[in-house]
Amino acid sequence: MESIPEKYLQALVEISHNINSIQNPDELLESILSIGLEQLSAERGFILLKDENDPDSLLPRAVRNIDDDKIADAKEISLSTIAKVQKTMQPILSFDTLSDENFDPTRSIMVNRIRSIACAPLVYKKELLGVIYIDSQNEKARLTRQSLAFLQAFANQAAIALQNARLMSQLQEENALLKEEFHRIFAFKEIIGKSKAMDRVFQMMGKVLNNDATVLITGPTGSGKELIARAIHFNGHRKEKAFVPVNCGAIPENLIESELFGHKKGAFTGAVQDKKGLIETAHGGTLFLDEIGELPLNTQVKLLRFLQDRRFAPVGEVKSRLADVRIITATNRDLQQAIQEGHFREDLFYRINVIHIQAPPLEERRKDIPLLVRHFLKKAAKRFHQDQPSITPEALAALTDYHWPGNVRELENTIERAVVLDSDHKIDVDDLVLPKPADNTNTISAGMTLEQISQLLTEKTLKATEGNKTKTAGMMGVSLRWIHYKLKEWGMTE
């Protein structure tokens, strides 16, 4: 093969710099094809790569100046050329197909008036990645015998760059997965838990850290919804920007719109100066709308509009503004029920419910209670400038058995109170000041028989009616005779 002319050597240096700086495989393929067409003064071409599912097949990945509906024809025209390159893994170049003895004046070449063809294999470590095909109807195309050495060198460079881009893309995907796993296990330091319920939460949090998908966090009061929102923000790509929390239920209805979107001076009585809204304050960061279910309907409309195009207008201003804000919402209400009752817009619900994270009640994650207790003991001791007390097994058992209607928040308050009241650096049951444990014999639980449930229900109904058996029978939908019979059977005094 002839040596590469000097005019091509400089081009190869520039090409090497350009294509090796592109890490996205699709962008790289487009760049490779553009460079090939430019250097050889050709008009059209395409790049075919091996089909991952069928290594013997080549699929078009970059096409230039060939309509999508004609790519099949273009492949047919060049089929023999591509097949030969694929088999020999050597480049083929013809600067005049009509006089080249290696090319028959086939109907396809004549009809399409192709004068020049260049086809080179993309080979990396003796493995064929694909081929680059270029042709031209222009007699002035810069395809000469000296171009063959350049074409092969260029194709070799392109193959290396393509493989590097593929590896980089694969590494980025693996890195993203590793980051997700890292965050799931290590990054959410303020969120304590190893239960299956919390593992599901961590997995969802890891998936949304570095994108701007709108997140809806649901769960009972005190289950840590704001803590989850903060963890998503401060472990994600917006962590250097503001995290702005707002409790929609704590702001008077006539002020909520102004608080969120701001207002202009004179927009209403009391608007004595311009006010920046919380959305604008959160620009670049995250706006956390807690208790989103309490948002008035008229404000829901304006929020929906903002979620659609990220534009808003302060109260009293006509011209809209743009804000780059991620929205995370939370509620302890059943929004589906609120929609049915006409208190919440269905279209807004779908906008905020792109990603749903369910914060489980503490009752569903009792395995985490000992971990949380130790965490809150350490936190409380530091806050009150005390040595961290120990906790007796009996106290820990009492905390684990308690039903925690106030969830994690109630547990933290209980531990803080115990640390304050502690006098011997040891938390005992008496230091906890827990409500009296519920009488487990007075509750329905799994495994009870229908007879046991009937007796329990009868006892509770009698208590509610202050012992009135007639009312009890009516409320339970049974006969008075049945009540008398059962009370006698159960040995209950009448």
Image (spheres, rainbow, N blue to C red):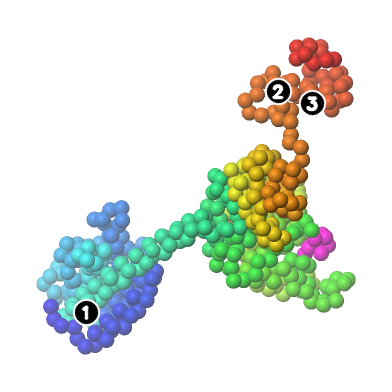
Magenta residues, as a range?
A: 251-257
Disc 3 and disc 2: Cα gap in Å? 11 Å
Label 3 or label 2, whichever comes before in sequence order = 2
Q: Is residue 255 magenta?
A: yes
Amino acid at pointer 1: Phe
Residues packed near mark 2 inside 10 Å, few (<14), some (14 to 19) or many (20 plus): some
Q: Quadrant of the C terminus?
A: top right
Q: Which mark is residue 284?
A: none
Q: Which residue is mark 1?
A: 150
**Which of the two residues, 486 or 472, is positioned nearer the viewer here?**
486
Query: For the residue labelled by badge 1, is the local secondary structure a helix, a strand or a loop?
Result: helix
Q: Is residue 378 above or below residue 239?
A: above
Circle nearer the viewer, 1 or 3: 3
Answer whether residue 211 is visible to the viewer in this image.
Answer: no
Q: Is 466 left, or right, of 414 in this rendering?
A: right
- Badge number at residue 460: 3
Residue furthest left in the image? 101
The vertical placement of 446 against 406, above or below, is above
Q: Which amino acid is tagged 3?
A: Lys
Q: Is 347 or 246 nearer to us in this picture?
A: 246
Badge 1: residue crowd in 10 Å (few <14, some 14–19, many ≥20): many
Q: Is residue 443 magenta?
A: no
Which secondary structure lies at badge 3? helix
Kindly identify the residue that appears in the image at 56 percent across and 64 percent down. 236
Of labels 2 and 1, the one closer to you: 2
Residue 274: x %, y % from top left: 79, 76
Estimate the spatial distance between the alpha carbons at disc 1 and disc 3, rounded to whole Å.
Answer: 92 Å
Discs 1, 3 touching: Cβ within 8 Å: no
